[in-house]
Amino acid sequence: MGAAGAALDGGRRRRARSVRADGVAGRSARGGVRGGRRRRRALGVRVVVGDGRVKATHPHRRRDRARGALVGLAVVLGLLLVQFFRVQVVRSSEYMLRSEENRLRQVPLPAPRGTIFDRNGHIIADNVPGYAVYVLPAPLDSIRHTLERLQPTLSLSDARVAFLMSRVQRHRPLLVDLDAPIEAVAFLQEHRGDFPGVYIEMQPKRRYHEGRAVSHVVGYLSEITAEELESERFQGYEPGQLVGRTGIERQYEELLQGRQGVRNLEVDASGRVVDQDFQGRVTNPAVPGEDLRLNLDLELQAWIDHIFPDSARGAVVALDPSDGGILALYSAPTYDPNDFVGGIDADTWAALNGDPRKPLLNRTVMGRYAPASTWKVATAGIALDLGVVTPEEHMPIPCTGGMWHNGLYRRCWKPEGHGSLDLAGAIAHSCNVYFYQLGLRIGLDNMLRRATDLGFNRECGVDLPQELPGRFPADRQFWVDVFGYEPLEGEVLSLALGQGPNDQTPLKMAQFYVALARDGSAPAPRLRAGGDPGHAWRLDLSRGAIEALREGLRQVTAPGGTAYYSTALEYWEVIGKTGTGQNPQDPDRPHAWFAGMAGPRGGEPEIVVVALVEFGESGSAAAAPLVAKAADFYLRRKHGIPVDTIQTLAEHIRAGRPAPWARERPTPGEEPGLRGRPTETRPARPVGGGR
């Protein structure tokens, strides 16, 4: 193509550019492009997109987006730093505690109860290692599942599982078994992975030496009740904690209990204990309870249990007249407090409560019986105090087997009568006719007033729970309130003989005889050694009057007395009074009493013993031998003389052993006072543990 063609082609290109430029300019003028013409450089050339917009990859656009992203990132990082500072610095302690709580579980660390010793240092109650099984806090379904898995291992019944589920608390471990068998413990430790949340705590377990002999004295433990947890006395106690239920364990609960500690256990997400040896970190150590020493003589207590008739019911109390210390406090039938350790099973508990002999009843302080002729000494003491009789005086009416009063014939226990007696003779022969007349001389109102002054309708003040007061009318209103009639003067006849509305505990009668063994005063009986004996009980009798009463007691056990053969001992003098008490349950089988004191011949009494045998019928045959044998056992040990199981004169005669010390021996076939249960002669066994 020539110059003309080239010129033509160039012109066309110029016109095309002009047309495009005009079109763009026109669109711009019509508002088609915002912000004017946009340009783009590509390979060093400024390029404008056909629609007038700059592409997203344009450098200006990328810088704007990067700048915004950096600002957003800085804000987020700043917020994170602020929150990190808040968590790690400002509230670090709070979150650390929450973390610890999520992986740690608190379980109680039981405190060992104090050891109980007798007067000679023998152990009555102490502790041995035991194992308790707990389930740590978890959802209810999880706890139920764990308990169901534990059923065959711990022999849990469905009823027990239901009971345990009712005891679940949100933040407290659940005590499943207080005393798990060692075989079950070994199985749980070996298969701990199968029992999430189960924890085994080695804790002290109570042990009672001579358990049956001391059951009513020492008592037993059981789990604290919901009602007790709400009471003021048990503030600070935890569910599942053991408390004293009866006896010394109850009386001195605060002293013996100690203070529980706390152990922290580490658990994983499933609630399994991480510590392989079931141990944890002790954050609050347990404080053991205080030890307690008693006046009780454990060997004497065991000896009384040994000689008491196996099938009989009754009580024996022995006191030290020098200070009122309780040497023995025995009630039969007994039970074994070791059965309550770890929780008593339902069958044993039902058997104890359903037994008509009432083995859980402490007859020494809760059994009230008509004191019978043992009370005649109190009648004589009141008469001497009032001055209505002298020791040498005889009653106007001699005993011929009975006497008339207000149209009624009042009988004596001896149909042929006793004849005319002085005070000591009347006590020795227990003559009803003499004491009928003595009661009339005293008068009903004086009898009520003086017996009340002496405390025969009050407690002794012994340091044991649940002691019952004696039952004796304080005034005439008693008959109106109880029987619905005004009493006649003749009511004093029954009271003078220890019958009628006159019921006393064996301990109350022992306290009265302590006053006779002393100067007329008797401190409150005490089990705890070294404690304050409390208010002294006074008879307000002269030494001469007390000696007159003692002379009557002495004649009871002297040759010719009703209790001579059953109480005569080789080394000691025993004096006392028999009694045959009314028995409303079986009038033909009265209760047998003997209350007495013993010591070296010619010396002061060193022990007072009272024995009651329910349905025993004869005080001289059933109760007196128990008193004599208990006194002999105690005094022989006290004075360093070997103990002999053949003790009383009656036992020597039965065994065919010579008794050169006896002041009187019966002719063959005429052995008074020898009937009754033969005494076993197996040797005494050692008791208790050394300190």
Image (cartoon, grey):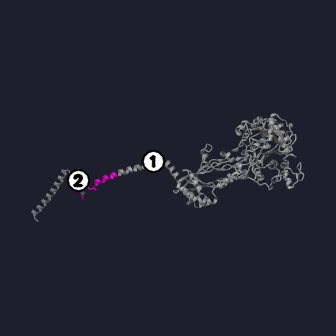
Front residue of 232 and 105: 232
Answer whether labels 2 and 1 touch (C-beta < 8 Å): no
Q: Earlier in the sequence, mark 2 or mark 1?
A: 2
Q: Residue furthest bottom?
A: 1
Based on the picture, tell me whether residue 644 belongs to the magenta stretch: no
Circle 2 sits on which residue? 38
Looking at numbered disc 1 in the image, what kind of residue is underneath it? Arg
The stretch in magenta equals 42-69
> Dot 2, how many residues are within 10 Å of its Cα: few (below 14), some (14-19), or many (20+)?
some
Give the side of residue 211 with respect to residue 69, left or right. Answer: right
Q: Is residue 413 visible?
A: yes
Circle 1 sits on which residue? 86
Looking at numbered disc 2 in the image, what kind of residue is underneath it? Arg
Front residue of 508 and 52: 508
Secondary structure beneath disc 2?
A: loop
> In the image, residue 147 lies at what x, y percent?
57, 57
Q: Which mark is residue 258?
A: none
> In the image, residue 156 lies at what x, y percent?
60, 57
Q: Residue furthest front?
A: 407
> In the image, residue 655 lies at what x, y percent?
85, 55
Q: Residue furthest left?
A: 4
Secondary structure beneath disc 1?
A: helix
> Dot 1, how many residues are within 10 Å of its Cα: few (below 14), some (14-19), or many (20+)?
few
Front residue of 176 and 561: 561
Is residue 646 placed above or below 452 in the rendered structure?
below
On-image quarter of the N terminus: bottom left
> In the image, residue 7 lies at what x, y percent?
11, 61
For the residues labelled 2 and 1, the Cα–Cα distance comes to 50 Å
